[in-house]
Each structure stands twice: as structure tokens, then as C-alpha cells.
Image: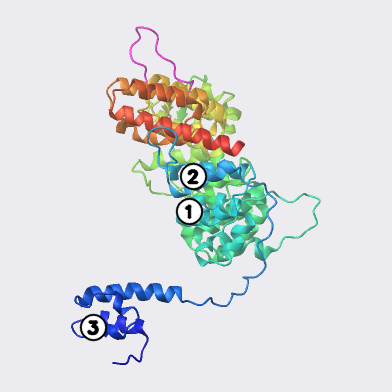
């Protein structure tokens, strides 16, 4: 039988129809004598394998493709040290690296710290690792700003040629502002391409970074598309105005008080309340003065909550119905006090925040009632966070917790109205760490998760020492590690690497093969890994 078609096509046809319906013409196929024809199915597979190798071996080279445009621009930054480049490859693949002792944490969780550190040092990765970096950032949007900055001009060159990495072209990495003496005019189209072409998250990022570099340009960019944006988008775009917020933004925000979305109106009002000299802040101050006054003799404060939520209050962002389930008058009262400038209270009473917080709070009708105490403190706490007032935040938090005197019983948690983690975030980083370390030394880790989240990372050595000591107490008490899983997850990323030796001692002292032994070994190994990682980047 003469075969008139390509042998590979013959094999494919037999495979599709079955060898019982289309027997193999084995004698006419190349290399047919190398297979046993007694089992047609096996013979088909063997012939296909042989034919595939034959086809590949006999393939002729294709003509060279045209170069894809000009080469990538030069990147003047110094390349990563060789050891740091190897570490990056480990982080990108998720391999443990074979050193460090014990099981390591999820290495993907350490990649953000590596990226931020490498970026801060002005280094560039080897070209061979850039595709892996871009793939990682494609899967995890939180990595994109640092990755795009690290990948530099090569990353953008690759993104122009691979649709999978197009996010690079829509991600803006912050760059230093040009010198004031520079006369070069930026290319608006190139500068703002992420805003006009990007996805929503990329537009928010672009606006936020632009506000940090040039607040006026960011406001003008938002103003240009404001009327065409969706309500939910306008809400988050307004949030981006927090960066670089100044009196120059007041006219735009005042206009937003008339927005058709109540959430947009509320956000605009909140931003205006952080500008002490704004017209809205003055209106809120007038209402707050009417709601809270110092009693004759200065012994206590009297509260007269608003009797109604009139149209002027509603325009200033206060909703008539409480969304929290609280009484309406209590809701209106809290919104007014939270939006009033905190400087008002010193001016109107002559008292410091500590002195005001020490006064009894009574109802203007029934001065013996103290039902407004928590409402007033909670509103002041919101105002302190909103206005970033460290004096008020410090007063509301109170002094750092101290162990009780001998024989005085168990220490009580400090009385903090409002969210203590948010108040902590207003304080300088070092002070946050000191307050949180004292809290942990007295109260342990049970209530410390959010407080630790408010502290700058990596944690200071004193805070790290307090956390390790608290973990040791938890292990000695018989508690299970998973009861502190949230804090343990943070320790792997935030604990000072210098505490690795102390954690290793805990691992050695724990019962062999116990949950705490494995937990401490994992933490110690991760700390050693981080220490090596940071040392390599420094070298």
C-alpha cells in the first residue's frame, strides 16, 4: 500500500478512529520495523513517540525574527549583591533555601519586606529575575508599586511586549519631585496614563502618589473627571485627598458637600473637619460650644445634645438617622463633637486635655447624671484620630500600663474610650512601641493584636523583647500556640531579627515535638532567614 499523506497525519487519524477501525499500515511507515505489530495500540504509541523525535530532529531553523524595537534603556542603579539576588530567587520560588534551621514561615509573606528594603537602597535586580518579579506582582497587586520601581526601565520595556505584564504601564512608582529651578515641562499624557487608562485600584494609587508629590496637580486631575465618576469611585478618590490636604482643597470639598451620594458628603465633611480653619470646622465648633460647656465653678462639664438635625447639619455630613443603633440625639452629639477642632476646648475652658478628661460629665437638665461621659470621650477620641492630635491621643490613652503594686491584685486594662490602636497610630513610632510594650508586659498578648498592628515594623528591640517574653509566659501557662496565631503571624514579619537567639532558647526549652517547640523553631528559623536577607541587601 502506498501512503500518500504525511506519516504523522496517518498516525493521528488512526488514534482518532481507533486501531480496530483504522489498522496501522506498519510496513509503510518510517521506523515501522522498530515496533511489535502484534499489539496495535502499543505500536501506535511507540510509532508516535518515534515520529515525534524524528520530526523534531529534522526540524529546519526558522528565519530569525526582527528585533522587537530598540533595546531596553540603560539602568544606572547598582545591581543587587550576588547573595541578595540568590535570596530573591528563593523568595520568588517559595523554596526554604536549605538553611536557617527548622521549618520556615511562608516565604511569600517575606517578599514585601525584601522588595521595600531593596527599593529603599536603590538597587536593581538581575535582568534574569525581572520576569519572575513581574509574575509575582501580577498575582499580588500589593507588590506592584515596589516591583515596578525595582524592575525599572527593563520592567517597562518587557511590559510593552507582554500583555500579561501590562499592569506595569498602569502602575505609578513615586519619584522625587523635580527641582524647583527645573524648567522642564512634564508630559501630561505620559504622567497620567494610569489615571486615564488604568483599572480602578491603579487610578487610586496614581492619584495618591501624585497627591504626595504635587497636591495641587492631584486635585486638578480629580476635578477634571469628577462629574463623570461613579459614586463609589468618588468616595475612594476623596480618601486619596488626605495626602497633602490643605486649605487649597476646601472649595472643592465644600462643593462635594452637595454631592448626591450621602457617603461622599460624609467623607467630604470629615476631611473638612481636619482643616482647623475651614468654614465647616467653624460651624461645627459653634455647635459643639452649644453642646458642651464648663459648669459654673469649673467642677464639671454640662452636655446639651442637639435637639434636631436641621438642614445645615445634614449638609455638613450629619445624617438624621443613626446608623449605629444609638439614640438620635447621642448620634448627632457625637458627630458634632468629633468634627469640632480640638483646639476649641482649650480656648473655651482654659483647660488641658488631661484636665478636661478628669472632669465629671453631667446632663444640662440632670447634672447628677453621667450618661454622656462615654459619648463625649468617644467623640474626642475620633477627633484626635481625625485631626492627628498627639496631645489628645496621649491623654485619652493615659499613661503606659504599669504592673500593680505587690498585693494589689491583678492589673486592670487602661480605660480607653474609642479604638486604642487608632489613638496609638497618632503618636510618634517610638512612643507607640513603648506604650505597647508596657501593655504587653502587664496584660499579655490576648488584647494586643491591634496594638501591635499599629506599631511601625520592624518592631523596636524593647517591644520585640516584650513580645518574646509574653510568648514564653503563654507557653509556660499551657496555652496552645493557635490561641495566639494572629500575633505569631505578625512576629514572623515584624519581630526584630536580633531576638532570634532568645526564641531559639525557647524552642530548646520547650517539650520535644510539642506544638510550642515547633512554633518557636519555625519563628527562630524565620528570624535567622530575615536577618540574613537584610544583611545581604546591606552588603
Badge 3 element: helix
As for residue 513 lying within the magenta part, the answer is no
Q: Separation of disc 3 and disc 1 at Cα?
A: 44 Å
Q: Position of residue 262 (x, y in %)?
A: 46, 55
Q: Separation of disc 1 and disc 2 at Cα?
A: 10 Å
Query: Disc count in the image?
Result: 3
As for residue 408 lying within the magenta part, the answer is yes
Q: Answer whether residue 508 is visible to the viewer in this image.
A: yes
For this rendering, which residue is in front, 79 or 393?
79
Kindly identify which numbered label has been placed on residue 111: 2
Q: Is residue 102 above or below residue 216?
A: above
- Considering every residue shown, the one lying at the far top of the view is 407
Kindly identify which numbered label has been placed on residue 136: 1
For this rendering, which residue is in front, 65 or 186?
65
Dominant secondary structure (helix, strand or loop) of the stretch shown in magenta: loop
Query: Which tag, 1 or 2, sits closer to the chain's start?
Result: 2
Q: Are marks 1 and 2 in contact (CB under 8 Å)?
A: yes
For this rendering, which residue is in front, 315 or 143?
143
Query: Which tag, 3 or 1, sits closer to the chain's start?
Result: 3
Badge 2 element: helix
Q: Which part of the image, by quadrant, shows the N terminus?
A: bottom left
Q: Is residue 189 above or below residue 131?
A: below
Task: Look at mark 3 in the image and give the residue it sits on.
Answer: 17
Q: Separation of disc 2 and disc 3 at Cα?
A: 52 Å
User: Could you tell whether 183 is left or right of 340 in the image?
Assistant: right
Q: Position of residue 450 (x, y in %)?
A: 42, 34
Q: Which residues are magenta?
A: 398-412
Query: Which tag, 2 or 3, sits closer to the chain's start?
Result: 3
Q: Position of residue 367 (x, y in %)?
A: 40, 25
Q: Nearer the viewer, mark 3 or mark 1?
A: 3
User: Could you tell whether 234 is left or right of 181 in the image?
Assistant: left
Amino acid at each position: 500500500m502506498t501512503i500518500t499523506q504525511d506519516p504523522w497525519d496517518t498516525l493521528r487519524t488512526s488514534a482518532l478512529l481507533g486501531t480496530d477501525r483504522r489498522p496501522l499500515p506498519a510496513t509503510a511507515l518510517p521506523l515501522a520495523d522498530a515496533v511489535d505489530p502484534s499489539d496495535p495500540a502499543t505500536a501506535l504509541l511507540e510509532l508516535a513517540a518515534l515520529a515525534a523525535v524524528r520530526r523534531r530532529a529534522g526540524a529546519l531553523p526558522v528565519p530569525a525574527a526582527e528585533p522587537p524595537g530598540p533595546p531596553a534603556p540603560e539602568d544606572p542603579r547598582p545591581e543587587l549583591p550576588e547573595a541578595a539576588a540568590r535570596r530573591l530567587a528563593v523568595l520568588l520560588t517559595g523554596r526554604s533555601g536549605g538553611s536557617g534551621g527548622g521549618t520556615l514561615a511562608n516565604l511569600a509573606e517575606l517578599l514585601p519586606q525584601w522588595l521595600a528594603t531593596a527599593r529603599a537602597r536603590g538597587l536593581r535586580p538581575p535582568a534574569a529575575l525581572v520576569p519572575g518579579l513581574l509574575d509575582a506582582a501580577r498575582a499580588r497587586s500589593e507588590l506592584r508599586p515596589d516591583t515596578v520601581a525595582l524592575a525599572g526601565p527593563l520592567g517597562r520595556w518587557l511590559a510593552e511586549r507582554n500583555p500579561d505584564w501590562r499592569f506595569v504601564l498602569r502602575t505609578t512608582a513615586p519619584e522625587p519631585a523635580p527641582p524647583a529651578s527645573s524648567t522642564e515641562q512634564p508630559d501630561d499624557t505620559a504622567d497620567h496614563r494610569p489615571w486615564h487608562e488604568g483599572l480602578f485600584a491603579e487610578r487610586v494609587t496614581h492619584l495618591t502618589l501624585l497627591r504626595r508629590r504635587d497636591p495641587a496637580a492631584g486635585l486638578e486631575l480629580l476635578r477634571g473627571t469628577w462629574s463623570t465618576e461613579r459614586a463609589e469611585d468618588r468616595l475612594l478618590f476623596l480618601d486619596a485627598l488626605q495626602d497633602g490636604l490643605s486649605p487649597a482643597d476646601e472649595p472643592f470639598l465644600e462643593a462635594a458637600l452637595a454631592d448626591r451620594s450621602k457617603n461622599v458628603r460624609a467623607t467630604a465633611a470629615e476631611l473638612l473637619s481636619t482643616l482647623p480653619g475651614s468654614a465647616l470646622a467653624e460651624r461645627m465648633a459653634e455647635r459643639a460650644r452649644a453642646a458642651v460647656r464648663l459648669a459654673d465653678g469649673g467642677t464639671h462639664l454640662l452636655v446639651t445634645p442637639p435637639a434636631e438635625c436641621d438642614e445645615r447639619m445634614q449638609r455638613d455630613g450629619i445624617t438624621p438617622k443613626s446608623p449605629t443603633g444609638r439614640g438620635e440625639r447621642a448620634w448627632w452629639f457625637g458627630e458634632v463633637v468629633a468634627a469640632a477642632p480640638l483646639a476649641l476646648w482649650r480656648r473655651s475652658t482654659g483647660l488641658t486635655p488631661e484636665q478636661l478628661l478628669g472632669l465629671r460629665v453631667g446632663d444640662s437638665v440632670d447634672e447628677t447624671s453621667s450618661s454622656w461621659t462615654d459619648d463625649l470621650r468617644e467623640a474626642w477620641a475620633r477627633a484626635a484620630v481625625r485631626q492627628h492630635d498627639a496631645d489628645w491621643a496621649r491623654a485619652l490613652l493615659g499613661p503606659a500600663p504599669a504592673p500593680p503594686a505587690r498585693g494589689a491584685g491583678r492589673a486592670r486594662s487602661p480605660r480607653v474610650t474609642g479604638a486604642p490602636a487608632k489613638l496609638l497610630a497618632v503618636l510618634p513610632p517610638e512612643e507607640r512601641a513603648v506604650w505597647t510594650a508596657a501593655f504587653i508586659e502587664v496584660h499579655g498578648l490576648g488584647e494586643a493584636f491591634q496594638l501591635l498592628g499599629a506599631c511601625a515594623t520592624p518592631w523596636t528591640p524593647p517591644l520585640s523583647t516584650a513580645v518574646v517574653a509574653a510568648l514564653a509566659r503563654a507557653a509556660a501557662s499551657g496555652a496552645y500556640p493557635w490561641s495566639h496565631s494572629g500575633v505569631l503571624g505578625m512576629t514572623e514579619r515584624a519581630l526584630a531579627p536580633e531576638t532570634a537567639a532568645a526564641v531559639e532558647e525557647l524552642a530548646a526549652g520547650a517539650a520535644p515535638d510539642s506544638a510550642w517547640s515547633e512554633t518557636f523553631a519555625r519563628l527562630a528559623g524565620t528570624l535567622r532567614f530575615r536577618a540574613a536577607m537584610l544583611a545581604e541587601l546591606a552588603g
